[in-house]
Structure formats: C-alpha cells, structure tokens
C-alpha cells in the first residue's frame, strides 16, 4: 500500500518537473531578464513542499510550511509591475501568515487534552487557508491568475492538497478525546466544508471569463470533493462493521488527490500556452484555437472531460468511490449516516452538473467556433516542449484510470472493486465506440463537393461577424442568472455609439467577484483599520501623553502582581 508521503510527494515531483519543462518556453521576451529570480523561487517552492511532506515534528513542519508560503509568494509576484499582481501577492501573503499563526496556536493547544477541540478549530483554519475551504479560499482566484502558468499548475496541483497532508499527520491531537466523538467532529466538519466548497467553488467558476480564474475556482471545488470523501471516511471509521466502506471513501479521496494533480496541472499549463500565444485569457475574445493550436486544444479537452468527472477518465473513477460510500451511508438507516450520505450525494451530483457546464464553456469559448479577436486569429501552436509537458501529465492521468481501481482495491481488500472495474470498462467501451464512429465518419463517409455558400437572414446586419455567435459568457449566462442573488453578478451595457448596422460598438459585460472578499473579508479588514486609526490618535507626538501611558501601564502591572 502506498504511504501517505508517497501519495502527496508524487504530485510535487510530477507536476513540478512538467511545470519546469513548460516554463523554459513559457517565459520569454522581457521576462527572460528575471529568469534567475523565477528559478530561485520555483526550486525553493518545490524543496519546501517536499520538506512539508517529510518533516518530522511540529517545529520542522511549521518551518517548512512557512518557507513554502514565502517561496510561492515570490512566484505569485513575478510580474510585480502590474497593480493586480501586487494586490494578489498581498492577499496571498496575508493568507499564508494567518494560516501559519493558526497552526502555531494549534501546536500549543494540542499538548493538552482539554483543549483538543480548540486545537482542531485552529488546525481547520490554518490548513483550510491553504486548501481553500470557504470562506478561506479568497486567495486562490486572486493568486492563480497573477502567477505564471507553471507556478499556478504547481500550486494548484501539488501545493493546496498538502493541507490534507497536514490534517492526516496531525490528527493525534485527539489523544484525549473519545474516538467516536473525534470521528463525529472531524467527519461533519470535513463533510460540511467540502459540500459548501464543491458546490460553491464550481458555481462561482461558471460566470468567470478569465480562464485561469475559472480553473482556480475549480480547484476549490475539487478540494471540496476530497474533503467530502475524507468526511465520510471519518464518520464510518468508528463503526467496526463499516471499516471497508471507510477505507473505500478514504481511498477515493486520496486517489482524487492524484487525479486532480495531473488533470489540473495540465489544464493550467494549457491556459499558460493560450496566454503566451494570444496575450489574453479572456474567453470572450478567444475562439477557434483548436485549428491553430491542435495539440494544446486536444490535451485541454481530454483533461477538462476528466476533471468534469466524465467516464471513463480518472476523475470519474475517484468520484465514483465517494458516491458508493455516500449510498452505503444512506443504506445503513442510521439518521446521522443517512443525512451525511444525502448531503454528499446531492453535493456531488450538483458539482458534476455545474462542472460539466463550466468546462463545456471553457472548451467551446476558447478552442471552438471562430476567433473573436485578431490575436486569436493569428495564434499558432506553442513550442514542442510546452505541449509535451502537458502530454506527460495527460498520460499520467490516463494511467490513473486502472491505477485508481488498483489503488482502491489494495486499500479496501477488494470491497466495491468489481463496481469500479465494470464502470471503468463500460466507460472505455463507450469511448472506444465513439472514437470508432468518428473515424468511420471521417474516412468512410467523406464530405462531398463543397456547396456554395449563400447569405442567410442575419437580423438586418449586412455582414455577420464572429461576435454575433455565442460567447463563453453567454453560454453559461442562464445558469448565472438563476443564481444571481448568490453570485451577485454585475452587468454593464455598452450602447451603440456609431452606425447601428455595425454591432462592434455594443457589448454586455458581466463581472462576478468573490462574494467572500466583498461580503466578509473587505468589511472585516475595514473595521479593523478603523480601530487602528482610532488607536493612532494616541501617537500625537506629545511626550507628556507618552509618560502618562507608561505610568498607567506600570500601575496596572503592579496591581496585577499584588492581586496574583
């Protein structure tokens, strides 16, 4: 059986190497002058992640954890001349240091059995800030679009799951708590946070026009899926008769960590290739890249299908194991497990539907149709080593189709392996049949002579353009409108300025910000800033006031010493 260190270190090495190969061609032009700085922070981040996985003891772990945050912040700030990058770096540093402070407090509290609950709460905040548990996820959609694509691939695919590594290694903080109560608290915490993160993350990914921002919210969703699997495993763990089901959920969650690393790593590298060749990540300004960048587009499509959970790809197999665990929980008849099973099954089903819509938007808006800008029309395929790096991760993800089944088989001793094997086999059969039909259509039924093109009715416009086609935003706008009270999408209408026969002057622009930043963190920090502004009045430069404050402090200390 694979050890925990192997499971978490494999994505670090695999995604790190692929990202390094991709970065050799991704960074070009003026940015090449800063290559030494990039490679310093890149290698430091990889080394710190490996140290986190293998650190023995609380102090070495915390030192490696803080080094990982500081080194990766250097990657986020690589394009520091842009204001948005500096803002994203500031938010990321706040999240890293807040998480480190919470983990330090958890390390102090975990030494006492009576403070185990408080220690777990601090650990949830500390590790949750790295994982992206709502509402601690706000740094992901800010940092990933700002960082270079190889850094985003490594951070999303290999770094954020290390929060689960910390949870798994530090669960001995429950040494003074009854195992059943500990399992209940851990299980429901993971399950609820995972359900909110999975559904909320992919829901906020739907209206995003920036491709990397969409992928960042998708990372929140996938961390939620992993958390639900671990939550079900903890709820089953205290029942001896349900031990195989607990191992099934545990194996599904750990397998999804590997699956997500390979799939999301390749998707971020593909997004970087699109940015390098077109200069934009706005899906509404792209389109038609499949013919111009066939390798990048094909690899992006395959990995997007896998991350959407479509059979027979590896994302489907890992989520199927968690589905089976949820249905087994419902069959037990116990109210607690029935509720947990319904919550997990409902969240996974909603997540799967929204994920399919989000990735259909990403594929269609970016790679299909006609180019909607001059940059997209002039794009060409990337240098070979860029799409080869994506191909390596894609091959690893395809190898995880049987690998996930074998991994879960070894975890559970054969429990539910037949179902997973049959599902994978049927999925492969349908995929093979679809490929055969496409080949038959391509070679056995060739197109006839090209027919003349005739003008069609075009709403009164004399020259139809690609801008009249559905954009990526328009594709998911009905869903975004349905959840508009939650998403708080802002719509700006740019009216006609010139000839009404030319639609290029008009547009509808939508913006969907992270509700956690606007509704929670920004007001919270504004209130703290007001408090410190009031305290700043004490620093008025008056020596007499400073002496008075010192005397009051000394008297307070004397009174406290006498009383104690």
Image (cartoon, grey):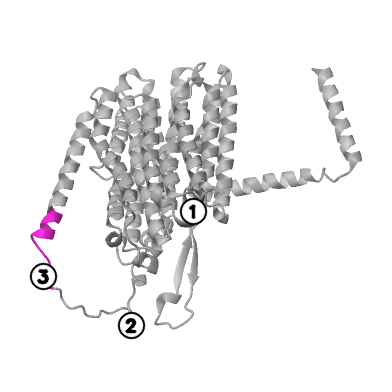
Q: Nearer the viewer, residue 300 or 107?
A: 300
Which residue is depicted at the point 25% across and 40% down?
Answer: 398
Residues rendered magenta in the picture: 437-449
Rendered position, 355 above or below 173: below
Q: Nearer the viewer, mark 2 or mark 3?
A: 3
| Circle 2 residue | 462
Q: Give the label, 1 or 2, closer to the camera.
A: 1
Select label 1 or label 3 by which is in front.
1
Q: Disc 1 or 2, which lies upstream in sequence?
A: 1
Number of residues whose C-alpha sits closer than 10 Å to that of mark 1, classed few (under 14), some (14–19) or many (20 or more): few
Q: Residue at x 48, y 70 (%)?
A: 493
- Quadrant in the picture for residue 473: bottom left
In the image, residue 555 sits, relative to residue 477, either above or below, namely above
Q: Nearer the viewer, residue 562 or 471?
A: 471
Residue assigned mark 3: 448
Query: Which residue occupies the foreground of this view, 253 or 340?
Result: 253
Kindly tell me whether residue 373 is visible in this rendering. no
Q: Is residue 508 above or below residue 293?
A: below
Q: Nearer the viewer, residue 109 or 29?
A: 29
First in residue order: circle 1 vs circle 3 = 1
First reached walking from the N terminus: tag 2 or tag 3:
3
How packed mark 2 is, by other alpha carbons closer than 10 Å (few <14, some 14-19, many 20 or more), is few
**Distance from the alpha carbon under mark 1 to that under mark 2:** 44 Å
Q: Position of residue 79 (x, y in %)?
A: 52, 52
**Residue topped by disc 1:** 31
The label number, if any, that marks residue 215 in the structure image: none
């Amino acid at each position: 059986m694979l050890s925990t260190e192997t499971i978490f270190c494999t994505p670090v090495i695999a995604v790190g190497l692929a990202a390094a190969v991709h970065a050799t061609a991704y960074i070009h032009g003026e940015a090449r002058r800063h290559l030494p700085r990039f490679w310093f922070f890149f290698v430091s981040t990889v080394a710190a992640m490996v140290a986190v996985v293998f650190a023995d003891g609380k102090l070495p772990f915390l030192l490696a954890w803080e080094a990982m945050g500081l080194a990766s912040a250097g990657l986020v700030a690589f394009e520091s001349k842009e204001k948005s990058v500096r803002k994203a770096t500031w938010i990321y540093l706040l999240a890293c240091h807040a998480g480190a402070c919470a983990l330090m407090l958890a390390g102090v509290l975990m030494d006492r059995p009576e403070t185990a609950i408080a220690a777990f709460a601090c650990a949830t905040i500390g590790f949750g800030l790295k994982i992206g548990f709502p509402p601690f996820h706000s740094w992901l959609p800010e940092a990933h679009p700002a960082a270079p694509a190889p850094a985003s691939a490594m951070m999303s695919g290999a770094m954020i799951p290390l929060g689960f590594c910390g949870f798994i290694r530090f669960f001995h903080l429950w040494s003074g708590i009854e195992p059943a109560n500990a399992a209940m608290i851990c299980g429901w915490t993971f399950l609820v946070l995972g359900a909110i993160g999975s559904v909320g993350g992919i829901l906020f990914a739907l209206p995003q026009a920036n491709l990397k921002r969409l992928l960042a919210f998708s990372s929140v969703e996938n961390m939620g899926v992993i958390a639900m699997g671990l939550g079900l495993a903890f709820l089953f763990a205290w029942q001896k008769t349900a031990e195989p089901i607990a191992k099934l959920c545990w194996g599904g969650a750990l397998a999804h960590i590997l699956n997500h690393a390979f799939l999301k790593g390749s998707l971020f590298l593909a997004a970087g290739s699109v940015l390098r060749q077109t200069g934009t990540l706005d899906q509404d300004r792209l389109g038609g890249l499949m013919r111009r960048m066939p390798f990048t587009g094909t690899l992006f499509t395959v990995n997007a299908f896998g991350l959407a959970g479509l059979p027979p790809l590896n994302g489907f197999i890992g989520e199927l194991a968690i589905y089976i665990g949820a249905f087994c929980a419902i069959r037990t008849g116990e109210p607690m497990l029935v509720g947990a099973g319904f919550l997990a099954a409902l969240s996974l089903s909603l997540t799967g539907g929204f994920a399919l819509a989000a990735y259909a938007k990403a594929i269609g808006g970016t790679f299909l149709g006609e180019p909607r800008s001059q940059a997209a029309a002039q794009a060409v395929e990337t240098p070979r080593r860029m799409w080869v790096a994506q191909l390596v991760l894609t091959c690893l993800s395809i190898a995880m189709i049987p690998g996930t089944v074998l991994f879960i088989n070894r975890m559970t001793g054969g429990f539910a392996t037949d179902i997973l094997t049959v599902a994978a086999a049927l999925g492969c059969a349908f995929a093979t049949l679809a490929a055969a039909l496409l080949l038959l259509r391509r070679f056995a039924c060739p197109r006839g002579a090209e027919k003349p093109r005739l003008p069609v009715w075009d709403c009164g416009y004399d020259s139809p353009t690609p801008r009249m086609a559905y954009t990526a935003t328009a594709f998911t706008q009905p869903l975004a409108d349905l959840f508009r009270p939650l998403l708080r999408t802002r719509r700006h209408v740019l009216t006609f300025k010139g000839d009404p026969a030319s639609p290029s002057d008009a547009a509808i622009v939508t913006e969907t910000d992270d509700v956690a930043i606007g509704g929670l963190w920004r007001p919270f920090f504004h209130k703290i800033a007001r408090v410190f502004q009031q305290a700043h009045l004490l620093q008025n430069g008056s020596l007499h006031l400073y002496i008075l404050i010192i005397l009051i402090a000394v008297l307070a200390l004397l009174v406290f010493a006498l009383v104690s």
